[in-house]
């Protein structure tokens, strides 16, 4: 009985050993296959000088011994980085400008190409000017603005220091600060130096890095002058508008310490009345 048990144990141990050796050999083979597996990446077909606009003759094409045309160069898969461009994607390089000189047979990398830049002045209509405003996390709608957004611009101003300049008065008789809606439905054409919404880089988890410290808006020369003075004299705050806002423009009511409570009451009454007969304005879903 004991001999049979010992035999069974020996057979089981042998099976386990064979299984372990087989798995180890499979792993080694997979590593070797990966180590020697190759892919083809885009490469320069001739010496390309910095500033050249890419055309098909710039891409490497070689004929193999059996007469087939081989695209690019062959590299070990382990040596390829995210900077390399696969030959299946190299047609996208046609028309781009290369920003450094490369020699024939050299890898063509993503960082070698100057991305097309949309000029800011092409986004302005006749009679408009581009003017940049300082913003922060509060005045800039918590970094939720993007090129193409529409905003209202609200100004808050301290008491006028000059003698003889009319200003609202507190109950105590001292001059009061005031807030007023300066301009409505103003178009954002850039945040910092980004002129397109898709200029924002993707961060981990698909989140977008949207921080900025300035926005550029389209304004008439007179509006630009008002904004320059208002930004120096007081504080400008942006209010984001919904994309399909069709409400008529409201009046430029001045808010100060003497009328803020009364205006808050009127605004709340109007809000409650509006909510009875309206629903939130929503953007049309993308196809």
Image (tube, helix red, strand yellow):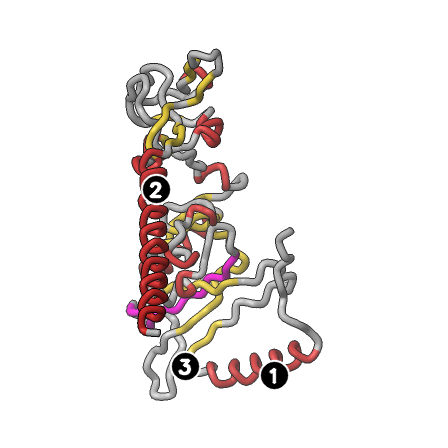
Judging depth in this view, the residue of 215 and 181 nearest the camera is: 215
In this rendering, the label closer to the viewer, 1 or 2: 2
Q: Position of residue 166 (x, y in %)?
A: 39, 71
For the point 34% across and 60% down, the residue is 16
- Secondary structure beneath dot 3 equals loop
**Residue 269, disc:** 1
| Mark 3 to mark 1 CA distance (whole Å) | 20 Å
Mark pair 1, 2: CA separation:
76 Å
Q: Residues within 10 Å of mark 2 (few under 14, many from 20)?
A: few
Instruction: Identify the mark nearer the N-term, 1 or 2.
Output: 2
Assign a secondary structure to mark 2. Answer: helix
Question: Earlier along the polypeptide chain: callout 3 or callout 1?
Answer: 3
**Magenta portion: prevailing SS class:** strand
Residue 73 visible to the viewer: yes
Q: State which tag comes first along the sequence, 3 or 2.
A: 2
Magenta span covers which residues?
A: 150-161
Please tell me whether residue 39 is drawn above or below residue 208 in the rendered image.
above
**Where does residue 41 sit, x and y in percent of width and height?**
39, 29
Mark 3 highlights which residue? Answer: 257
Measured along the vertical axis of the image, is residue 76 above or below residue 237?
Answer: above
Q: Position of residue 3 (x, y in %)?
A: 32, 69
- Disc sitting over residue 29 in the figure: 2
Residue 268 sits above or below residue 213 on the image:
below
Q: Distance of mark 3 from mark 2, alpha carbons?
A: 79 Å
């Amino acid at each position: 009985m004991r001999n049979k048990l010992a035999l069974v144990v020996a057979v089981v141990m042998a099976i386990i050993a064979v299984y372990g050796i087989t798995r180890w050999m499979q792993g080694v083979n997979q590593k070797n296959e990966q180590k020697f597996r190759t892919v083809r990446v885009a490469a320069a077909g001739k010496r390309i000088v910095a500033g050249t606009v890419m055309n098909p003759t710039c891409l490497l094409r070689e004929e193999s011994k059996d007469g087939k045309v081989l695209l690019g160069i062959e590299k070990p898969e382990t040596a390829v980085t995210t900077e390399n461009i696969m030959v299946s994607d190299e047609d996208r390089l046609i028309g781009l400008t290369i920003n450094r000189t490369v020699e024939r047979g050299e890898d063509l990398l993503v960082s070698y190409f100057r991305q097309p830049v949309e000029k800011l002045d092409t986004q302005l209509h006749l009679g408009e000017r581009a003017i940049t405003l300082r913003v922060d996390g509060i005045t800039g709608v918590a970094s939720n603005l993007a090129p193409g957004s529409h905003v209202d611009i609200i100004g808050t101003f301290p008491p006028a220091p000059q003698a003889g300049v009319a200003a609202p008065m507190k109950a105590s008789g001292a001059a009061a600060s005031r807030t007023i809606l300066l301009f409505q439905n103003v178009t954002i054409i850039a945040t910092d130096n980004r002129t397109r919404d898709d200029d924002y880089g993707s961060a981990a988890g698909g989140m977008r890095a949207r921080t900025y410290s300035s926005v550029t808006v389209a304004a008439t020369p007179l509006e630009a002058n008002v904004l320059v003075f208002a930004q120096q004299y007081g504080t400008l705050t942006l209010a984001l508008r919904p994309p399909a806002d069709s409400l008529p423009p409201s009046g430029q009511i001045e808010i100060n310490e003497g009328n803020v409570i009364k205006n808050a009451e009127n605004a709340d009454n109007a809000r409650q009345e509006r909510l009875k007969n309206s629903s939130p304005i929503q953007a049309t879903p993308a196809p």
